Image (cartoon, rainbow, N blue to C red):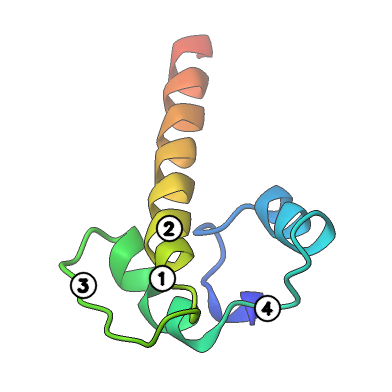
């Protein structure tokens, strides 16, 4: 589920897009298992059959981390 991702690692707006526009009701098991490790920058190997969401498993935490970094930089420049 999306609840398995610690607060601050995935933005509520991202969850809304995944649910409303992409039809996700939760993360697939492979995605949920590796999200934290990838988000934190740990080396991660994910072995899973075709169609289990490996691409999103790698991209989602990277995008979320990048967007968070950009938002922090913008806030720092304002302050």
Q: Which mark is residue 61?
A: 2
Q: Quadrant of the image for the N terminus?
A: bottom right
Left or right: residue 1 versus residue 17 is left
- First in sequence: mark 1 vs mark 2: 1
In the rendered structure, which disc, 4 or 1, sits on the residue that comes first in sequence?
4
Dot 4 corresponds to which residue? 26
Check disc 3 and report the residue beneath it.
Answer: 44
Residue identifier under label 1: 35
Kindly identify the residue that appears in the image at 48 percent across and 49 percent down. Answer: 64
Nearer to us in this view, 39 or 60: 60
Q: CA distance from mark 4 to mark 1?
A: 13 Å
Q: Secondary structure at mark 2?
A: helix
- Which secondary structure, mark 4? loop
Mark 3–mark 2 distance (CA, rounded to whole Å): 12 Å
As helix, strand or loop, the secondary structure at mark 1 comes to helix
CB of mark 3 within 8 Å of CB of mark 2?
no
In this picture, is 60 found above or below 46? above
Query: Residue at point 41% right, 63% down?
Result: 55
User: Horizontal and vertical percent for residue 50?
Assistant: 42, 81
Q: Quadrant of the rendered structure where residue 69 is? A: top left
Q: Is residue 66 above or below residue 54?
A: above
Check if mark 4's residue and mark 1's residue have beta carbons within 8 Å.
Answer: no
Rendered location of residue 5, percent (x, y):
53, 73
Horizontal relation, residue 33 to residue 20: left or right? left
First in sequence: mark 4 vs mark 3: 4
Which residue is at 41% across, 71% downward? 35
Front-most of 78 and 29?
A: 29
78 and 11: which one is in front? Answer: 11
Residue extending farthest top: 78
Q: Is residue 21 above or below residue 79?
A: below
């Amino acid at each position: 589920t999306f609840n398995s991702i610690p607060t601050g690692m995935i933005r509520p707006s991202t969850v809304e897009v995944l649910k409303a526009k992409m039809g996700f009701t939760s993360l697939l098991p492979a995605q949920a298992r590796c999200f934290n490790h990838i988000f934190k920058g740990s080396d991660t190997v994910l072995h899973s059959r075709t169609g289990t969401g490996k691409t999103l498993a790698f991209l989602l935490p990277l995008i979320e981390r990048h967007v968070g970094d950009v938002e922090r930089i913008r806030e720092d420049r304002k302050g």
